[in-house]
Image (cartoon, rainbow, N blue to C red):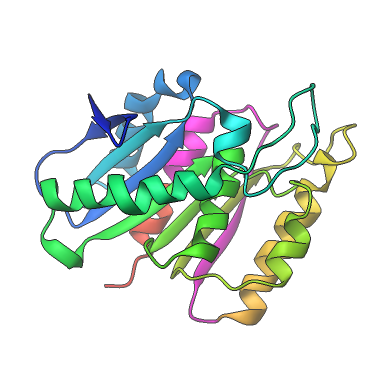
């Protein structure tokens, strides 16, 4: 894994030469510690697929990944509305850089994934742009205030959606976050009902929100690669 500054952001790249598939993920500083492990798991799950993995560091998690402003749900820090700027970084800076440096032109497929609020960001991005062939929304924060209304009035612009959640995540005393199970079921049902062209799955993992995030995220990316259109 090598570090590179792209568009003013710290990015962490794994590649073994040219590839047709790019995996992109927003990460925090804690996740940096397990990126190598995550990549190794993906390689084990899709051994015959060559991919390039690119993580970019998020320093203000609640601001840079939130699609709109919202009050604090836990702790004292509320949510900003920085997702649009983060998406602009992806489409205008990171993806063009990866495409020019590593790939064969317009035939490249980009897959965007993320855990927790980064998973919600990945979902939101799929409603904004067709830049991503698939989305891995792993334990996504679909409890986010207003998300259930948003997804009912917008259409996805991607071909694959992987959703997952821990089976204990909705069992919380926090009334807002307890909606995560209801909302992810709603998300899956809407995709099933409204667009039969989107390959999708909702996978349940054992444990709470903090159980093996690198494994869960690797499984999401692997599902996208294993279920891509050939």
- With respect to residue 207, does 186 lie above or below? below
| Residue in the image at 30% along x and 32% along y | 40
Above/below status of 25 relative to 67? above
Q: Is residue 220 visible?
A: no
Q: Which residue shows up at 38% across the image and 61% down it?
A: 132
Q: Nearer the viewer, residue 133 or 100?
A: 100
Q: Who is closer to the viewer here, 56 or 19?
A: 56
Judge by depth and name the residue closer to the eye, 92 or 124: 92
- What are the residue bounds of the magenta stretch? 196-219
146 drawn magenta: no
- Please state, as top left, top right, bottom left or bottom right, where the C terminus lies in the image: bottom left
The residue under the point 17% across, 38% down is 15
Q: How far from the left and from the top, in percent, is residue 108? A: 22, 61
Q: Quadrant of residue 105?
A: bottom left
* Relative vertical location of residue 230 with respect to residue 216 in this rendering, above or below: below
Q: Locate residue 44, reporting x and y percent.
A: 30, 39
Corner quadrant of residue 167 = top right
Horizontal side of 162 relative to 181 (left or right) equals left
The residue closer to the viewer here, 75 or 54, is: 75
Q: Is residue 223 visible?
A: yes
Quadrant showing the N terminus: top left
- What is the tally of numbered marks visible in this picture? 0
| Residue 54 image position (x, y, % from top left) | 30, 39
Q: How far across and how far down the image is residue 138, in percent?
A: 56, 45
Is 215 magenta? The answer is yes
Image side of residue 109 versus residue 33, left or right: left
Q: Is residue 138 above or below residue 1?
A: below
Q: Is residue 36 left or right of residue 213?
A: left
Q: Residue at x 67, y 48 (%)?
A: 68
């Amino acid at each position: 894994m090598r570090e590179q500054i792209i568009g003013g952001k710290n990015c962490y790249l794994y590649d073994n030469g040219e590839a047709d598939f790019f995996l992109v993920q927003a990460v925090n500083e804690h996740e940096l510690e397990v990126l190598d492990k995550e990549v190794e798991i993906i390689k084990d799950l899709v051994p015959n697929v060559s991919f390039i993995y690119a993580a970019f560091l998020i320093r203000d998690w609640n601001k840079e990944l939130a699609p709109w402003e919202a009050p604090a749900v836990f702790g004292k820090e509320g949510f900003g509305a920085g997702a649009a700027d983060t998406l602009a970084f992806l489409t205008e800076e990171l993806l063009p850089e990866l495409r020019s440096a590593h790939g064969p032109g317009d035939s490249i497929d980009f897959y965007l994934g993320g855990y927790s609020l980064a998973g919600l960001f990945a979902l939101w991005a799929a409603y904004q742009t067709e830049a991503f062939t698939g989305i891995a929304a792993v334990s996504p924060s679909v409890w986010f205030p207003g998300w259930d209304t948003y997804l009912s009035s917008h259409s996805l612009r991607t071909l694959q959606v992987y959703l997952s959640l821990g089976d204990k995540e909705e069992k919380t005393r926090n009334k807002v976050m307890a909606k995560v199970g209801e909302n992810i079921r709603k998300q899956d049902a809407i995709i099933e009902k409204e667009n039969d062209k989107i390959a999708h799955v909702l996978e349940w993992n054992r444990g709470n929100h903090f159980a093996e995030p690198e494994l869960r995220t690797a499984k999401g990316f692997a599902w996208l690669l294993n279920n891509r259109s050939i």
